[in-house]
Amino acid sequence: MATWKQLSQQLDSPEGQKKLAPLYALDGTQESLEKGVKRAKHVLEQFGTLFGDGEGACLYTGPGRTEIGGNHTDHQHGRVLCASVDLDMLACAAPNGMKKVRIHSEGYPTLEVDLTDCAMRKSEKNTSAALVRGVAARLQEFGYELEGFDAYVTSSVLSGSGLSSSAAYEILVGNIFNHLNCKDEIDPVTLAKVGQYAENVYFGKPCGLMDQMGSSVGGAVFIDFADPSAPIVEPVNYDFSKSGHALCIVDTGSCHADLTDDYAHITQEMGAVATFFGQDVLRNVSKEAFYAQLSELREECGDRAVLRAMHFFADDERAKQEKEALKQGDFAQFLKLINASGRSSALLLQNIFSVSNPTHQAVSFALALGEEILDGRGAIRVHGGGFAGTIQAFVPLDLLNVFQDRMESVLGEGKCHILHIRPMGGGVIL
């Protein structure tokens, strides 16, 4: 079993660096690889400073994810297109011989969770402790005996970025438990479900499963949630580096604080339309029957609920069409579909600003500015849950510098992130 120092020595070898390249040097440059090695060594050294040698130490990753298609369709058992990206949570972790998890996330106090008591605690709602305890509780329900571990974590997945930092954290913790206590028996899809359970039940956020799946599985994946207990996961083998476009995630400078009700209303209103037809979710409602009863639905559920259901039916189908466009190498059609999804989110789903604070419309503003810069090229849409946070753009390479400079001149330096879709989801690196 390795110590943190031995892992650090591995990073000095070509073999060790080769394991980092597909995660942190997807642009193919030596500069990016060296930056990734430096970051990994920093994590290892900080672990050693806080926790000692760490016999049995490993280097773990939990990536952020980008939603490409299917905005708010997963919780209605719909279809999505998502991918893991090269921003992640990186950790050195080792068993500590105690029934206690100790995690030091860079910039925060050390978190401690007692594994002998994994009952849900209301006082931990919306905290990292809830996520750790929720993941542990679920794995214990599966029959696994969990031992404690120490971990030092650093993150490039900015909170509120729309890249789902909470899912990255859940997948990171889940993989540490899986490797140390579960003999790596738990597959990525099951780990994603464990993460969703922790977020829904312990953390208190009613999210679908897409975030965790995008982080856990890796690469670009099309997921059909018709049966959430057994989602159909289909890898989409498309090389985005050959598309002539860069993937940009733009931080609008707004945060997701106090938006839980906004997210919950989407689920509730879509659910109300499904209930009208005697179903639990919209996936089980006939689109033809829905459009045949619009008058009754407007009276029963209200206009916004009906509009949001319209978005579901359209974006659920679009996610499939986006997958097919990529498989056929038709990137122009893919961009048209992305733009159509963005318009649907803005006009029908209505998740680009919160009605509780309509004077603040950072997402709407960033979308308008981005459209003006792109001038009919590329594609742009709200990213993730919406209401605040980030937007997503596919920017032609010849326009990339102009796009980044102009967005950052208004929104602030460092707000436009150029990302890459990486092939590996959460797991053990070294």
Image (cartoon, rainbow, N blue to C red):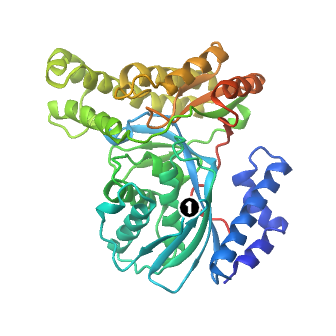
**Could you tell me which quadrant the N terminus lies in?**
bottom right
Q: Quadrant of residue 402?
A: top right
Judge by depth and name the residue closer to the eye, 212 or 263: 263
Residue farthest along the bottom direction in this orientation: 97
Q: Position of residue 339 (x, y in %)?
A: 53, 21
Number of numbered markers:
1
Q: Is residue 373 above or below residue 139?
A: above
Q: Quadrant of residue 357?
A: top left
Which amino acid type corresponds to the residue marked 1 in the rendered image? Tyr
Judge by depth and name the residue closer to the eye, 138 or 363: 363
Q: Position of residue 426 (x, y in %)?
A: 56, 59
Q: Position of residue 252 (x, y in %)?
A: 56, 31
Question: On the image, numbered disc 1 is attached to which residue?
Answer: 108
**Could you tell me which quadrant the C terminus lies in?**
bottom right
For the point 39% across and 35% down, which residue is it? 72
Answer left or right for 76 relative to 175.
Answer: left
Residue 178 at least partly seen: no
For the point 80% across and 67% down, which residue is it? 15
For the point 36% across and 53% down, which residue is it? 230
Q: Position of residue 419 (x, y in %)?
A: 67, 40
For the point 72% across and 37% down, which residue is it? 241
Q: Residues within 10 Å of mark 1 (few under 14, many from 20)?
A: few
